[in-house]
Amino acid sequence: MSVIKAAIVGGTGYTGVELLRLLSGHPQVEVTAITSRAEAGTPVAELFPSLRGHYDLKFTAPDVQQLAQCDVVFFATPHGVAQAQVPELVARGVRVIDLSADFRLQDIPAWEQWYGQQHACPELAAEAVYGLPEVNRAQIAGAQLIACPGCYPTAIQLGFIPLLEAGLIEPSGLIANAASGASGAGRQGKTDLLFAENNDSFRAYAASGHRHLPEIEQGLARAFGSEVELTFVPHLLPMVRGIHATLYATLKTTADAAGSQEALQQLFEQRYAAEPFVDVMPAGSHPQTRSVRGTNMCRIAVLRPQGRDKVVVLSVIDNLAKGASAQAVQNMNIMFGLNENQGLESPALLP
Amino acid sequence: MSVIKAAIVGGTGYTGVELLRLLSGHPQVEVTAITSRAEAGTPVAELFPSLRGHYDLKFTAPDVQQLAQCDVVFFATPHGVAQAQVPELVARGVRVIDLSADFRLQDIPAWEQWYGQQHACPELAAEAVYGLPEVNRAQIAGAQLIACPGCYPTAIQLGFIPLLEAGLIEPSGLIANAASGASGAGRQGKTDLLFAENNDSFRAYAASGHRHLPEIEQGLARAFGSEVELTFVPHLLPMVRGIHATLYATLKTTADAAGSQEALQQLFEQRYAAEPFVDVMPAGSHPQTRSVRGTNMCRIAVLRPQGRDKVVVLSVIDNLAKGASAQAVQNMNIMFGLNENQGLESPALLP
Amino acid sequence: MSVIKAAIVGGTGYTGVELLRLLSGHPQVEVTAITSRAEAGTPVAELFPSLRGHYDLKFTAPDVQQLAQCDVVFFATPHGVAQAQVPELVARGVRVIDLSADFRLQDIPAWEQWYGQQHACPELAAEAVYGLPEVNRAQIAGAQLIACPGCYPTAIQLGFIPLLEAGLIEPSGLIANAASGASGAGRQGKTDLLFAENNDSFRAYAASGHRHLPEIEQGLARAFGSEVELTFVPHLLPMVRGIHATLYATLKTTADAAGSQEALQQLFEQRYAAEPFVDVMPAGSHPQTRSVRGTNMCRIAVLRPQGRDKVVVLSVIDNLAKGASAQAVQNMNIMFGLNENQGLESPALLP
Amino acid sequence: MSVIKAAIVGGTGYTGVELLRLLSGHPQVEVTAITSRAEAGTPVAELFPSLRGHYDLKFTAPDVQQLAQCDVVFFATPHGVAQAQVPELVARGVRVIDLSADFRLQDIPAWEQWYGQQHACPELAAEAVYGLPEVNRAQIAGAQLIACPGCYPTAIQLGFIPLLEAGLIEPSGLIANAASGASGAGRQGKTDLLFAENNDSFRAYAASGHRHLPEIEQGLARAFGSEVELTFVPHLLPMVRGIHATLYATLKTTADAAGSQEALQQLFEQRYAAEPFVDVMPAGSHPQTRSVRGTNMCRIAVLRPQGRDKVVVLSVIDNLAKGASAQAVQNMNIMFGLNENQGLESPALLP
């Protein structure tokens, strides 16, 4: 099989270097370009010494001509960038996997409100396929433009979906208490992201409204078949990688036996039986974020404490992997008809 | 004023060393004994070099005669120890502040079920005063035996109490998503508490039932006036000190204006206006655990995301301080008629 | 005794907040002003929530008139600032304690070379007293301008001084391998100081030449009586506070019995017997940085591994405390004839 | 090529799980057995959830018959175990790679002194090949028993070897200041390895003599051609993986031009030009431990500060990888005539 030529736009952040790490071990992909205006001319291995010996590439200024010669272009850019550059690439037949938020919301006014700017190409947003393979595998296979899910949305949707699809829980009153490693905030020199500001401390942030909320509610509504209402409070962990979502929902009073601990366990196991990257852990487990570090896995446990009416789901991913770059590679594998776990097979780094 | 003679039983753990730290700066207390069977004969400053120059004490084997000569005895022991030793001290007129779980629950069968052993003196449990000054200040002043609240229970009760006392929220469906630094698990050589097992990772634990649950529900029921139902999921943070509780409750449909963001803010500010150790932060704040490190403060923020029917409370304490040893000192100050913040005035260590 | 009015210039960094923390507990000092151009008008407690309830102060733009009414002004500014503002204050009789590097070097050309700018008032540098009380106590008592030592220089000088004063070691070939917590790099939003860049990683920096080198050599030369030659390699630790210096020197062949483990231990104990803030630990100890966290202590161990010709000294301080703000308070206490450990008596926060 | 059958003896520690992680991606190796007396019967994936989906193996009690059917047996055991079990395996023609200290020292009395027990088979120690490929590649290829180097010894030897082989430095007065992540202390429930004891703190340990000292001196002496004298002080870092060695040596006065920064850089580059796992970084670099996390790489920088007579080498490895399990796999690849970097090609996990 011929090699897939890939480019990365905006490669100086953490999702960029994670894509490079993962693709370096992908037998059917060659990264032919990586762009950055600010670092144009700098060897990738100079900015990221972990890649010394793995890449000879230098960052280049973005150039549509060059990008258009690739089979697939990953956008690892802040929101607003992809929507400006993607249309031409799509028009020229290039497949695009956008890791940013630009094409995730179908509700354009909502996007414009949460991101505080006008959307540059609503028509492409309508065409874009939401790249959560556990839900959209078939559409991903035929897509030209993938909106890769956010990190919180991935962990939270995978945890709630079995319950919503089965109609076991009340659709309002959903709660997602989630915590992320600091890499989720990106590689930007902000005071409040300093080591000395965050080590040995913990806090919530954006508790009154985080941009991932509408994306999550959109996905949960699809699973449920109508609107849901979620309270979502994100927190910043003194660690680098990993998202832990603790989800709470109220079992419908009609749930009965279907809501027993055993039935819930079975429900989750069946829903994800065929999924290579969702691991339903044995009842009573408490998944650790390190157990998925560097991998595309989502590990999930479901429980019903005290036999009361609340069901609790624990869901962990690596925010840079299943929450971003590895999921992007999974999408690429599906789009190009490759083995879905190509390049994604390494176990987590533990300890 | 004469000096208060204090002893610490079981002083080799983290609550022990924290008591010593705090009492070293208390102008009216002298620590005259600290016990440990295992470390009898070892100078305190050898086990805890941070105390070099502050204490000449050695650990001694516990001796009731010696303890009975003190004005106050702190128990910093695992559960089960205090209930065996306290009765004699109480009988001899010594005041006791128990930092363990032995006297926290009024429901003795519940205690016996959660702690897996028979309770040795239920009659004292009935007499013990629950040492949460924000609720029980008057009883504490006259108490001979204080059951010092647990760390999670302190952070969670202080967050829910204003809402429950005001009758603004539904008493069932309460959720407490809480996370603790590793010092909360104590100074015991267990594999799963190793640095290499916990750094750069995060996980829930005891999600199907933690021993602090009945204590919290007992306290919340007192505030509400009848039973409440709480789902409580604790998590282990890759940090040393601090508890962060993120609390969720459903506003009663009758709450109306009383449930507005402004009214909630005012409710909390009024409830704690006279409290020296509860700080209601401005609306929109996200309290960090480091902002209370080493102190007896509880910092709280309350919010109503999206104006929906959920109220969210963020509550942080230092698990070893307001969650244990500093709160014990606060109780002592109240019991002995001292200025309540004597020895507890230092600001948090930040960064 | 009347209260000492103190001001802090440039108080938004870590040495500023540490000064505020320490001075809040100092019974004889009142902080009457704290300046910051960028944060003028912001309450101190808004920038540093740990200080809520402790200070009502707001940051103000620097104003010489206001500063001149204080008894003492602390400069917690980047280098270059103090030398511009101090002359007028000194002329008006205000005592100044400069925590920056501006007045530490007597060799002005060396200062200008290492800091890359012209020195604004060499004449004051000549008058300034180097604020290491263990060496200069008498001069500090009479000083009007104190050059407070750097963090690395404090830890390293205190470790080498007994050996140099006793003439036991070769003056060339000295090695200082030191490591600092990230707060040492200040509160600036630089990419390479991010949490995600530093957690679970360790590296040297400025190995070919760090600005503290000439300051350290100047101090060691004073102790020895003539020039010394030091190799100094600093490292950045994945922690917030603390400096650990591991010092190596070659015993003179004439050292003989004076170089035995026992004699070295005795030498250090005698040298620092009267020092309230230097703790010579028992032979065989390995001081931990946390044992001095938040305090003005320097803990030291000396050893002679394998009985070979190298002596090794382990020296730990808190870079923000004995390495900056607490040492500044110690200097102030000496200058104003107060008890030297006033405001500096709290034990370290451990764990 | 046929698959190599491998067994791991003592697989419940960190080197065990790291071997499993690396071998899961090795195309020519199948792990057929992993032993543990304590965990016999436990699925590997239960103890290490990171391996769920990668291994169906259970731990078994050690059984020489079973081990003897493997092509290669890795010993990931505490010292003392391999020397008891290896002789029979060797006698039966199995190749053995011992990650413990049992066969590293040629000087048996020294081994017995440092490890406090009698050596069970000195004759095999004499036959064992020290598995540092950068020095012993040819002998490794033909070896039946490999003594895999310790973690500190690997980082330190690779840093000093070019200088010693070239005869540029004084052989006495060598200094190795090294620091390790906590995983280097193993997965044992000791109080002083707890998270709460080590986070945000740093300390030296075993400063008066660490067991790796004779191993390092033995290796350096081989490189130099006669005895060397090293002062080695290890430190414990508040991080999980990684060793950073900062090495100091005195240039011979005859070194002259050969000791210039440029010549030193060239010396190192030439020495390691053909080595797949030693990366000499550009002059002025400061290698970070995270840049080798999870990999078999050693990254090195060499410098000559201030042009004085000291040469400084910075050398980083992952203590569990190049310092243990990955180096073991590298040895296996060489022994079995495989591509040397088979299974060892993934870049480091960064951030």
Image (spheres, coloured by chain):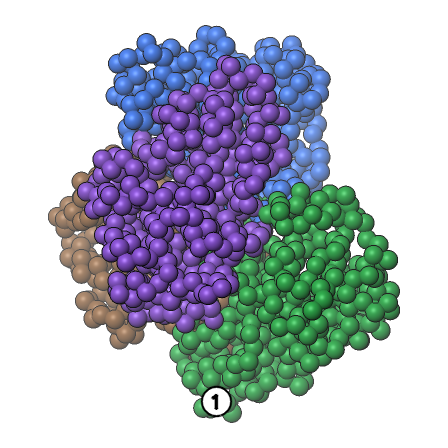
Chain colours: A green, B brown, C blue, D purple
Identity of the residue drawn at 47% across and 23% down: D167
Q: Residue at x 86, y 67 (%)?
A: A92
State the residue lying farthest toward the top.
C225
Q: Mark 1 points at which residue?
A: A258
Q: Residue at x 50, y 37 (%)?
A: D315
- Image-quadrant location for residue C51: top right
Count of numbered badges drawn on the protein = 1
Q: Residue lying farthest left?
A: B65
Q: Picture coordinates of residue C89 (x, y %)?
A: 65, 18
Query: Which percent across, then down, holds residue B93?
Result: 19, 53
- Location of residue C225 in the rendering, given as x and y in whole percent from the top left corner: 45, 7
Q: Going by the image, does A237 lie left or right of C124?
A: left
User: Residue shown at 43%/52% (left/top)?
Assistant: D335
Residue type at the position of mark 1: Ala
Q: Is residue D296 above or below residue D307?
A: below
Instruction: Give the image quarter of residue C125.
Output: top right
Q: Residues within 10 Å of mark 1 (few under 14, many from 20)?
A: some
Looking at the picture, does residue D143 appear above or below residue C268? below
- Choose between A144 and C64: the one closer to the eye: A144
Q: Horizontal placement of C106 versus D319: left or right?
A: right
Q: In this view, does C152 lie above or below B192?
A: above
Q: Is residue B240 visible?
A: no
Label 1 resides on the chain identified as A
Which residue is nearer to you in this view: C276 or B26? Answer: C276
Q: Can residue A330 be seen in this view?
A: yes
